[in-house]
């Protein structure tokens, strides 16, 4: 099976007022094409930092990351941005919709930035998340769940090879979060996308084929989480 993401001995440190702060240390990870991976851990454990490194939004202090066949440290910032535009979709906790654009315009934005126009594809993904009739509404006119469904449509509109999701249900109530997570996995299955998500939602994590926990800057593969176990509990 082909490899979508390969991480070898990655570390990330930043300068703090009392010296170097080590966020990640010796992280190794391989994600196969079409795989689903959840990363759990306590707040401040470095989950979002790791996700940013995997997507090439930042570079590690040491080690190597290969994304969609490209070693990220061999690319400049412009080339990494171009790789993301071709291969990657994102879903964030806080939706990140542009308030001045309609739902349809928000979904179309990744295609426009890539120099493409595909009205039919935009309508298709909006319909797939049940929002075709809300396509001319602005974010302020949509509920939180509807905004995240727009964000899902935007993430999948370009048919990404890899999808990164950072707490995709974190701002939603339980029922809405369940509906959004169902859509996420259905769209992921339908598009044969590789999924890497960061979450505190244990039910969401259990839906992935592989679960890892970040603890002390290190990544540990874990067995399926037991009922009542917290994402931040030690492995």
Image: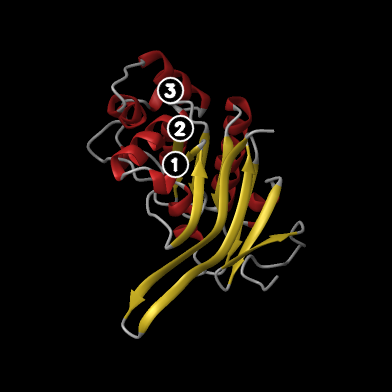
Where does label 2 land, which residue? 87
Q: Secondary structure at mark 1?
A: strand
Q: Closer to the camera: disc 2 or disc 3? A: 2
Mark 2 crowd level (few <14, some 14–19, many ≥20, 10 Å Cα): some
Q: Is residue 233 above or below residue 222?
A: below
> What's the residue at 74%, 60% (across, down)?
225
**Comes first in the chain, label 2 or label 3:** 2
Residue 16 picture location, percent across and down: 34, 78
Residue 8, visible in the rendered structure: yes
Nearest to viewer (mark 3 / mark 1): 1
Quickly name the residue at label 1: 90
Q: CA distance from mark 3 to mark 1?
A: 21 Å
Q: How much space separates mark 1 and mark 2, taking CA atoms?
A: 11 Å
Q: Secondary structure at mark 2?
A: helix
Q: Which mark is residue 132?
A: 3
**Residue 22 has which mark?**
none
Q: Secondary structure at mark 3?
A: helix
1 or 2: mark nearer the eye: 2
Q: Can you give x and y, in whole percent of width and height, for residue 10 in the image?
A: 52, 60
């Amino acid at each position: 099976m082909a490899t979508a993401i390969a991480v070898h001995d990655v570390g990330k440190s930043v300068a703090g007022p009392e010296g170097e702060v080590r966020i990640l240390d010796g992280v190794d990870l391989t994600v196969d094409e079409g795989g689903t991976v959840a990363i759990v851990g306590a707040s401040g454990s470095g989950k979002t930092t790791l996700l940013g490194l995997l997507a090439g939004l930042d570079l590690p202090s040491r080690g190597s990351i290969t994304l969609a066949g490209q070693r990220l440290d061999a690319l400049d910032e412009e080339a990494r941005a171009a790789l993301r535009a071709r291969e990657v979709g994102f879903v964030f906790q806080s939706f990140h919709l542009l308030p001045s654009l309609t739902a349809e315009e928000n979904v179309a934005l990744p295609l426009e930035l890539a120099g493409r126009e595909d009205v039919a594809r935009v309508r298709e993904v909006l319909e797939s998340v049940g929002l075709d009739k809300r396509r001319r509404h602005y974010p302020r006119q949509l509920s939180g769940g509807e905004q995240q469904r727009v964000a899902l449509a935007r993430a999948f509109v370009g048919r990404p090879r890899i999808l990164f999701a950072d707490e995709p249900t974190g701002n939603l109530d339980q029922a809405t979060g369940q509906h959004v997570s169902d859509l996420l996995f259905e769209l992921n299955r339908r598009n044969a996308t590789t999924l890497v998500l960061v979450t505190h939602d244990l039910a969401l994590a259990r839906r992935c084929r592989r679960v890892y926990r970040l603890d002390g800057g290190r990544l540990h593969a874990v067995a399926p989480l037991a009922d009542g176990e917290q994402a931040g509990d030690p492995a």
